[in-house]
Amino acid sequence: MATVLAGEATERARVDTSENVSVALDAAALMVMSGGPTTAANDLATSLLETFNASSPELAWRSDFILGTCEEAGEKRTFARPMAGVGVNLSRASALVELTQRAKAEQLAPAAVGHELKLIASLPSPYNRWVSILAAGVTAGAFSQIAVRNLGALAVVFVAAIVGQYFRSMLLARKVAGVTTTLIAGIVSASLAATGLKLGISKAVNPTLIASVMYMAPGLPLVNGFLDMASQKYLITGIERIANAALLFLAMAIAIGFAYVVVL
């Protein structure tokens, strides 16, 4: 009888540990996929585990997954969480921070936190598709005026960025890889900008071509990458993020080169 009770207790402990770690890793992965830095995601997981009175596992971070290793009943267990489709949704990141604070204040159970995480994961972007498209045009147009005050360049870049962002939103909706999406949208935008140059609407070649694709500049991934590197604890993750951002910049440069050679 004692052996059976001990076995049941061990099994309950195993289930509790699995649930605790799973919920904490889900929250951390969602933070990263919403645009948060690794340091914030790690703090989120640690805070939740403290709320659940669970020991923190050893976490191994990469830009595309998290590994958590903990010991239960004398055995090592490893939990993995992929982080696919990393984007920017700071409303979700803010909601995650608020949930963590509320979980600590109200001592929420892992099941309750897990339910809240599903609701947060379903939160749409605070900006709809057309607002994002308009913002891309305004961003690119404003960037073009930094180098040269030219209304022709402003008009060409504004239209090129709007059309490019429209194609980009369609590709993202179809889950096309980020580099491929950036390359295709960049070719569309840069080619339209080159057409405007060829028609004589704008005379500023370099500012027009470069500004036409700048709406896709991966600013937040670069910032998060440098933050991870500065912490030293997440040096490899930071390098991966910066390398991914550099790859996107390379795709943008290829798109500009294509438009310059083919269209102009």
Image (spheres, rainbow, N blue to C red):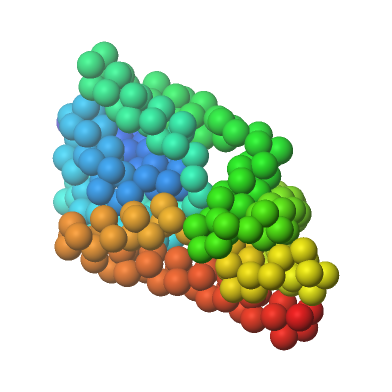
Instruction: Please tell me which residue lies in front, 74 or 238.
Output: 238
Residue 236 placement (x, y as % from top left): 28, 68
Quadrant hosting residue 9: top left
Rendered view: 208 above or below 106: below
Instruction: Please tell me which residue lies in front, 244 or 141.
Output: 141
Query: Which quadrant, please, contains the N terminus?
Result: top left
Q: Residue at x 38, y 60 (%)?
A: 222
Q: Residue at x 51, y 63 (%)?
A: 147
The residue at the far top in this view is 106
Instruction: Please tell me which residue lies in front, 1 or 93.
Output: 93
Instruction: Please tell me which residue lies in front, 66 or 136.
Output: 136
Quadrant hosting residue 100: top left
Residue 122 placement (x, y as % from top left): 56, 32
Q: Residue at x 26, y 55 (%)?
A: 227
Q: Residue at x 49, y 45 (%)?
A: 88
Residue 87 placement (x, y as % from top left): 51, 49
Residue 194 placement (x, y as % from top left): 74, 72
Horizontal arrangement in the rendering, residue 83 relative to residue 135 (left or right)? left
